[in-house]
Image (tube, grey):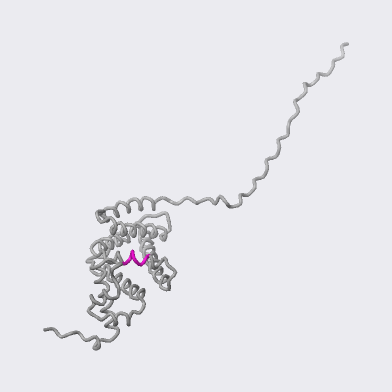
């Protein structure tokens, strides 16, 4: 018979690690709206009081779980991706195999768009990911791996829109092959990136007045020249 686990022999750091690992497992097993502190405590094999003591704010536990889970992505890749787009595609493939994280990512959007105290922290995570993609795409542009006529941050925003959109599609339309759709969307993106963006005109801007054309001087019709009278001798 296995000895019962005694939480008192573990320090708070070890217990917090167990709680975060338990949260990841809980989100893999259950829908996002079902998971709460009691579910995580059960999965982690800890008491509810321990979970609530170490994470009195639910958003704090969610943020730590989000950070730890995203850090685990890509750790099992056998070879580095050839470019930033390949990196995003591999990440999407990992999402297909581990949809629990996608449910968490979709769930925290409501927190990031709210006015809660943790909203800014979640928004910062999104901004940091866009910055990572922009830096990666800039390296691809500089090395000639990708061709683009627009700034890297704009290309990163478009690439992230495709990626996150397909994440949502994966959850609500599970019959769609999101990897196939990603490849199709990327082909369109790459073609669009090659087009140099034309400057946009501000229709509300003050238009400089043009110099009024000078009126043309009307020429008087020439009178027929009178021939000098000849004196007849």
Image quarter in which the N terminus is found: bottom left
Q: Quadrant of residue 157?
A: bottom left
Residue 15 relative to residue 219: left or right: left
Q: Answer above or below: position of 122 versus 14.
A: above
Expressed as whole percent of the image width and height from the top left, the position of residue 206 reads 61, 52
Range of magenta residues: 104-109
Q: Is residue 219 magenta?
A: no
Q: Residue at x 22, y 79 (%)?
A: 45
Q: Is residue 106 magenta?
A: yes
Q: Residue 52, image x and y in percent?
A: 32, 80
Q: Which residue: 87% across, 14% down?
A: 231
As displayed, is residue 92 above or below residue 122? above
115 to the left or right of 15:
right
Q: Residue at x 23, y 76 (%)?
A: 42
Q: Is residue 199 left or right of residue 176?
A: right
Main SS, magenta residues: helix
Residue 10, placed above or below residue 28: below
- Which residue is most to the right? 233
| Residue 215 picture quarter | top right
Q: Quadrant of the C terminus?
A: top right
């Amino acid at each position: 018979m296995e000895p019962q686990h005694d939480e008192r022999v573990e320090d708070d750091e070890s217990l917090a690690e167990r709680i975060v690992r338990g949260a990841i497992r809980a989100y893999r097993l259950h829908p996002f709206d079902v998971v709460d502190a009691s579910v995580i405590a059960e999965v982690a094999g800890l008491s509810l009081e321990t979970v609530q003591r170490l994470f009195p704010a639910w958003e704090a536990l969610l943020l730590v779980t989000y950070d730890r889970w995203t850090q685990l992505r890509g750790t099992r890749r056998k070879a580095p991706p050839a470019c930033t787009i390949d990196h995003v595609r591999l990440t999407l493939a990992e999402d297909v195999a581990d949809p629990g994280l996608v449910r968490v990512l979709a769930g925290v959007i409501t927190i990031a768009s709210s006015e809660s105290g943790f909203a800014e922290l979640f928004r910062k995570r999104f901004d940091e990911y866009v910055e990572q993609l922009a830096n990666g795409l800039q390296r691809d542009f500089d090395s000639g791996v990708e061709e683009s006529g627009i700034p890297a941050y704009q290309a990163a925003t478009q690439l992230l829109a495709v990626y996150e959109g397909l994440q949502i599609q994966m959850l609500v339309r599970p019959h769609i092959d999101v990897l196939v759709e990603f490849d199709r969307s990327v082909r369109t993106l790459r073609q669009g990136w090659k087009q140099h963006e034309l400057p946009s005109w501000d229709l509300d801007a003050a238009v400089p007045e043009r110099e009024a054309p000078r009126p043309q001087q009307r020429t008087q019709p020439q009178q027929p020249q009178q021939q000098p009278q000849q004196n007849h001798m």
